[in-house]
């Protein structure tokens, strides 16, 4: 390829890409995944040309190689280890999906029984952790409590923090998957001022979680199987989503050799943001703020106004430029839950349905490919299940823990793994001399 001193050319062939910069040409390897776009390996670019690449928000940059989850955002496809999310959500259970994400294959019956037993036997948390909660203010947001308590796990379970030991890595993984519902339910109970409820190991993962959240010592609590199945589906739908912001945070934190509990706490902190996991809480708050169907046009107009920072929460996605496949299943689950609970006239649901209808036919949303995402429906369902909005992102964290841990494990076990250390385009001052304060 021709090049002149200021010319930047980029051409791709099947197996390599010729890149030239300031008269120097190099040949970059083009890697092909099992499916998905080709990936230009720019690892040697700086060494060969002295140049960095610039891609804020990683819109065109693969940060790692992975075999766990595949998304085709244009087609609305989500696969875990090759299995479509709708098949897993309709036919599988959450611990089966956890096994699949962690080990790469669906378990046999014996493997499943063994895995269920291992997770179930780790559901209790160290009794001293109950005292740890009391250090938080009663009105603390449960996500703030989650960041603190999960980070503190490394203090309680220090015997599984040696990341070079595969046995300790697996124990830490099982502990995190098993204890996260207990920790989340305790955060909820603390939030509402009720006593903590111990896990009940005869119940499955989702039913046990509902029990720990909604049982009280003064009366019997029977888990409704339809609601437990809906909870299970919500967990499955949120289990992993390849290199999203919180997962990338977990990988980056883990790349320094930090222990798994600290890495997952970092993931929780990232998930809390309204552009990510915090969107389900924000979406429901927005539906409440809209309040009634007749006010929708006002909010649609605000969403389109470039001078107004307002966005329709629960719409749009960095990767999906089509219907979020999880949203379709979530929408069905929402109706099942509302049907089971006999909720017919929920004003928030009316607003949600009309908002969805308008947004799907509005030129602005069509042109920008802004479809409802999973958070649009999960909020309505979680509210119907009895959770306050402040708990929504906590539930997301419970489900995503397995995705974080599977991705963390994959990274640690990758022989080419290095500490994550991005470069930058520096636009600050060049070197200048220090002026003593008296002279400034
Ligand atoms: N409402 C109105 N306009 C929007 C919205 C929205 N929800 N989302 C994107 N846009 C517009 C945006 O203004 C921009 O317009 P323009 O090209 O004229 O500047 C265009 O669409 C592209 O948006 P972007 O911000 O460049 O896209 P992104 O890929 O950086 O952001 C997003 C993706 C999810 C952060 C964004 O769509 C958003 O803020 N949505 C609302 C929050 C939300 O629902 N988040 C949950 C994501 S799904 C769960 C998860 O993975 O955590």
Image (cartoon, rainbow, N blue to C red):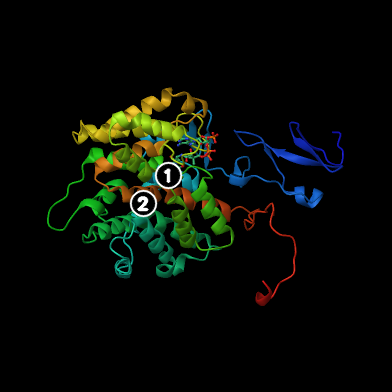
Read off the residue under disc 1. Answer: 239
Estimate the x, y position of residue 204 in percent, counting from the top left.
29, 47
Crowd around label 2: few <14 · some 14–19 · many ≥20 (10 Å)? many
Estimate the x, y position of residue 309 in percent, counting from the top left.
46, 41
Residue at the image position 74 percent from the left and 34 percent from the top: 15
Residue at the image position 83 percent from the left and 41 percent from the top: 6
Quadrant location of residue 253? bottom right
Q: Earlier in the sequence, mark 2 or mark 1?
A: 1
Q: Nearer the viewer, mark 2 or mark 1?
A: 2
> Which SS class for mark 2?
helix
Image quarter where the C terminus lies is bottom right
Image quarter where the N terminus lies is top right
Task: Pick the residue in front: 215 or 318.
Answer: 318
Read off the residue under disc 2. Answer: 394
- Work out whether 222 lies above or below 157: above
Task: Pick the residue in front: 168 or 396.
Answer: 396
**One can see residue 372 in this view:** no
**One can see residue 218 in this view:** yes
- Work out whether 295 lies above or below 67: above
Quadrant location of residue 136? bottom left
Q: Given contact means CB atoms under 8 Å apart, are the residues at marks 2 and 1 in contact? A: no
Real-space Cα separation, disc 2 to disc 1, in angstroms: 13 Å
Estimate the x, y position of residue 212 in percent, counting from the top left.
25, 54
Crowd around label 1: few <14 · some 14–19 · many ≥20 (10 Å)? many
Q: Is residue 278 rendered to the left or right of residue 161?
A: left
Q: Is residue 107 rendered to the left or right of residue 66?
A: left
Q: Is residue 410 rendered to the left or right of residue 141?
A: right
> Which SS class for mark 1?
loop
The extreme front residue here reads 439
Residue 296 — which label? none
Task: Pick the residue in front: 131 or 86.
Answer: 131
Residue at the image position 76 percent from the left and 31 percent from the top: 13
């Amino acid at each position: 390829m021709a090049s002149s001193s200021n010319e930047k050319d980029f051409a791709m062939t099947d197996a390599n890409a010729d890149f030239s910069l300031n008269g120097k040409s190099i040949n970059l390897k083009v890697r092909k995944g099992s499916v998905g776009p080709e990936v230009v390996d720019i690892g040697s670019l700086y060494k060969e040309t002295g140049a960095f690449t610039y891609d804020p928000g990683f819109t065109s940059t693969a940060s790692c190689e992975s075999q766990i989850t595949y998304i085709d955002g244009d087609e609305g496809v989500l696969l875990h280890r090759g299995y479509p999310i709708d098949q897993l959500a309709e036919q599988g259970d959450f611990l089966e999906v956890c096994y699949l994400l962690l080990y790469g294959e669906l378990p046999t019956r014996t493997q499943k029984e063994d895995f269920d037993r291992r997770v179930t036997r780790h559901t209790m948390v160290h009794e001293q952790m109950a005292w740890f909660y009391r250090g938080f203010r009663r009105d603390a947001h449960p996500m703030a409590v989650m960041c603190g308590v999960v980070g503190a796990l490394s203090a309680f379970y220090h015997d599984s923090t040696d990341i070079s030991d595969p046995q300790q890595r697996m124990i830490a993984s099982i502990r995190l998957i098993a204890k996260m519902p207990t920790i989340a339910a305790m955060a909820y109970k603390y939030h509402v001022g009720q006593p903590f409820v111990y896990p009940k190991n005869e119940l499955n993962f989702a039913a046990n979680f509902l029990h720990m959240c909604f049982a009280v010592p003064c009366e019997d609590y029977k888990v409704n199987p339809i609601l437990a199945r809906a909870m299970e589906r919500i967990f499955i739908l949120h289990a992993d989503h390849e290199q999203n912001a919180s997962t990338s945070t977990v990988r980056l934190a883990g790349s320094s050799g930090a222990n798994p509990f600290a890495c997952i706490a970092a993931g929780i902190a990232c998930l809390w943001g309204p552009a990510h996991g915090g969107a389900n809480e924000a979406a429901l708050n927005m539906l409440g703020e809209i309040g009634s169907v007749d006010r929708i046009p006002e909010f649609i107009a605000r969403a389109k106004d470039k001078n107004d920072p307002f966005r329709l929460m629960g719409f749009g996605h960095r990767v999906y430029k089509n219907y979020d496949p999880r949203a379709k299943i979530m929408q069905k689950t929402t109706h099942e839950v509302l049907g089971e609970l006999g909720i017919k006239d929920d004003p928030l649901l009316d607003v949600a349905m009309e908002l969805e209808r308008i947004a799907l036919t509005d030129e602005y949303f069509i042109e920008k490919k802004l479809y409802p995402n999973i958070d649009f429906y999960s909020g309505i369902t979680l509210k119907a299940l009895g959770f306050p909005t402040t708990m929504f992102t906590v539930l997301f964290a419970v489900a995503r823990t397995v995705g974080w841990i599977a991705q963390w494990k994959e990274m640690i076990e990758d022989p080419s793994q290095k500490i994550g250390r991005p470069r930058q385009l520096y636009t600050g001052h060049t070197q200048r001399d220090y002026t003593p304060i008296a002279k400034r």
